[in-house]
Image: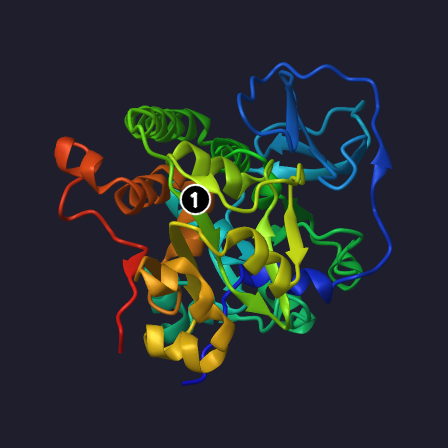
Amino acid sequence: MNYKLNFIPYLLSFFLLLSCSVSVSETSESDNHSVKYATGYKINKTESFTHIRIYDPWDTTQLLQSLILIDKTKEIPSSLPKGTIIRTPIEKAVVFNSPQCNMLSFLNSEKIIAGVCEPEYITLPYVRKGLKKGEIINLGMASSPDIEKIIELSPEVIFVPAFQNNSYQGLAKTGIPIIQCAEYMEQVPLGSSEWIRLHSLFLDKETLADSLFNVIEESYATIKNIALTSTSKPRLLTDMRYNNIWYTPGSKSFMATLYKDAGAELALNNNNSTGSMALSVEEVLDKAQDADIWLIKYYNSEYLSYSDIKDDFIIYTKFDPWINRKIFACNTYYSSYYETLPLYPHLILKDLVRVFHPDIVHNNPEIFKPEDISYFKPLKDK
């Protein structure tokens, strides 16, 4: 069977999108809008405008963008900080990836989506229906979008994922404000979901965003505290090789934090990286052969089995989770895992606790319910 790993689509494109940087030096300004977990942006609100500063996640001493939001019913002030002016609330937008579509939908604002990139990775029913009816336009690959179609749509803003050293030069020539979102670079799960509060500023839905985020925050804390009651911490192996390189989460990364909060310990945790580590198969086998549980994510119309793993790479059969049948897999062809993770980390956390600590699940039926979505399922023999 031919299958492939499904890394987050916009992370795969990271290696393809390289051009000059657009970062500008930070200016002296205080922020007066509380941001609890996210480190990628700051907000300063005044009576006449809102100033959003989005930081370069690869060099946090630099600003990636400076955005000035002004209510459409108000006049533009004569004196403003340097930045791109955006009149709010916005009513039409182009969205490059599924997490941004999800955030707009979460704020009951999916109707502003006029065009998307790579729709095959978007499971949001509203978008799929809109594409089928021709009400939402397919703009092609995020790495090479159809600029002419974007101009024809005439959106007020374009939501794009932030990539290192990329200024979206082709898009910039359209004159349409580009909002570079780096929620996936946050180091803690709640930092990622807190970007919902940033999105709400473009829609005048701050109160709604705050109330929704509070629910996520409280749910995450509840599930985390339940996981911490377990006396066991399974050693965890994640993903598989990709072009002979095995990418694993750094011990200070977003995913490492999520796994830790779910009550697991990374088998490969001797690196303080906030991103991913690129290891050889030999290194992984040496350090993680005796892992207790193995989590796999892949993308295929057919479901992966233990036999498929063996046929793909015989070395996989040397790992204890293959031998002991302790592999759990998420087929992102059918699952909304990548759309859910940035905004609803508590749902992924709950699923991980179910995998790592089934005893806790049985002891907390009011939290772990049969109807909950299962992202990671036990791998089948065939």
Residue topped by disc 1? 235
Pick the quarter of the image with the C terminus: bottom left
In this view, 241 is above or below 208 = below
In the displayed orientation, state which residue is furthest to the bottom. 1
**Identity, as a three-letter code, of the amino acid under mark 1:** Arg
Q: Which residue is drawn at 81% across and 30% down?
A: 61
Mark 1: secondary structure: strand
Q: Which residue is drawn at 14% across and 37% down?
A: 362
Direction from residue 140 to residue 238 in the image, left or right: left
> Looking at the image, which is closer to me, 272 or 258?
272
Q: How crowded is mark 1: few (under 14 residues within 10 Å), some or many (20 or more)?
A: some
In this view, 76 is above or below 290 = above
Q: Which residue is drawn at 71% across and 29% down?
A: 76
> Looking at the image, which is closer to me, 271 or 223?
271
Direction from residue 281 to residue 359 in the image, left or right: left
Direction from residue 234 to residue 13 in the image, left or right: right
In this view, 29 is above or below 172 = above
Q: Which residue is drawn at 37% across and 34% down?
A: 263
Q: Note whether residue 254 is visible.
A: yes
Q: Where is residue 206 in the image (x, y as percent from the top left)?
A: 46, 27
> Looking at the image, which is closer to me, 21 or 147?
21
Q: Position of residue 8 (x, y in %)?
A: 53, 59
Q: Note whether residue 89 is visible.
A: no
Q: Position of residue 91 (x, y in %)?
A: 50, 48
Q: Position of residue 333 (x, y in %)?
A: 38, 69
